[in-house]
Amino acid sequence: MKIAVGIEYDGSGFNGWQYQENGVSVQDKVEHALGFVADHPVRVVCAGRTDTGVHALAQVVHFDSHSQRSERSWVFGANANLPKTVAVIWAREVPEAFHARFSAQSRRYRYVIFNRHVRPTFLAYRVTWDHRPLDVERMAEAAVCLVGEHDFSAYRASQCQAKTPVRTVHQLNVFRKDDLIIIDIQANAFLHHMVRNIAGVLMTIGAGEQPVAWSQQVLHSRERALGGVTAPPYGLYLVDVDYGPDFDLPKTTHTQLVW
């Protein structure tokens, strides 16, 4: 049978989601824990691979198993074998047609900026610190042109392996909450470093170092070299993967976050 699992993790201690020979990955820890419960090796497929230092509140994976286990056993058995920075939130048996990556209709990320002149302490590695006074209204205005279907070549990493740079951004909101500036973006899919490159452009505009129209100029250029610095990974969170009503998967709540 095929099992889907919802996972959250603090990515600051991992070399990203994907398994790699030199470095600790979230995938390796999750497969080991689920394999212990299944009593056989498990290989998972995820909704979206996250980079080193990137966090997830609603990562979704699927895997196949011939072992009969209750949903509760998958959750608590896996968590008993996971580090404290990774947790399985739910587990569901799903139809054979389900695919964690290709069945997803949209994904949503949040990028959290700690905006004050003194660096954070308790939120270190969970937010991106920018000491420059950022104008959130300029950032929000600059974000408008990125909504819709566009060629995001200028906003993807040079090593991005996606077959097409065209993506559809459904919504892109920028707002402030005390010392935090939050970029909330939902799209059908994302390119490598796409959110971090958008954040970098918007932060540069918010600091007054480029005009509001620069975000659109970068977009139309389709040249990554014109897009400025890629923002750090620490403030980036995968917060939702939407599969529509057909699969009836649980929605993860984010009550543990102040933002």
Image: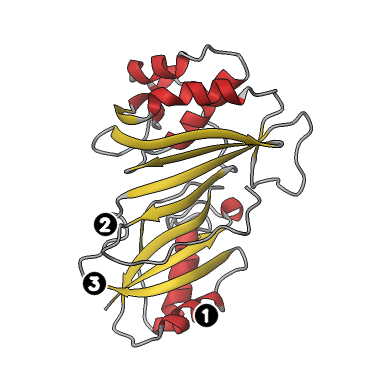
Which mark, by number, is residue 259?
A: none
Dot 3 lies on which element? loop
96 horizontally vs 226: left or right: left
Question: Taking the image as drawn, is residue 44 in sight?
Answer: no
Mark 1 is surrounded, within 10 Å at the Cα level, by few (under 14), some (14 to 19) or many (20 or more) other residues, namely some
Measured as percent of width and height from the top left, residue 162 is found at 29, 39
Give coordinates of residue 221: x percent, y percent: 34, 15
The colour scheme of the drawn protein is secondary structure
Q: In the image, what residue type sits under mark 3?
A: Pro
Gap in Å between the C-alphas at discs 1 and 3?
22 Å
What residue does disc 1 label? 76
Question: Would residue 179 be visible to someone looking at this image?
Answer: yes
Cα separation between marks 2 and 1: 26 Å
The secondary element bearing badge 2 is classed as loop
For marks 1 and 3 on the same chain, the one whose residue lies earlier in the sequence: 1
Where is mark 2, residue-wise? 103
Q: Label 3 neighbourhood size at 10 Å, few (<14), some (14-19), many (20+)?
A: few
Q: Residue at x 71, y 47 (%)?
A: 123
- Farthest residue to the left: give it: 97
Which residue is more in the foreground, 212 or 44?
Answer: 212
Residue 165 lies left or right of residue 41; in this view the side is left
- Sequence-wise, the earlier of marks 2 and 1 is 1
Marks 2 and 3 sit apart, C-alpha to C-alpha, by: 11 Å
Q: Going from the N terminus, do you reach mark 2 or mark 3 first?
A: 3
Please state the horizontal and vertical placement of residue 253, each as a whole percent of the image: 52, 60
Give the amino acid type for the residue marked by disc 2 in the picture: Ser
Q: The disc labelled 1 sits on which kind of residue?
A: Phe
Residue at 45% x, 19% y: name it. 215
Circle 3 sits on which residue? 95
Left or right position of 21 against 204: left
Q: Position of residue 128 (x, y in %)?
A: 63, 38
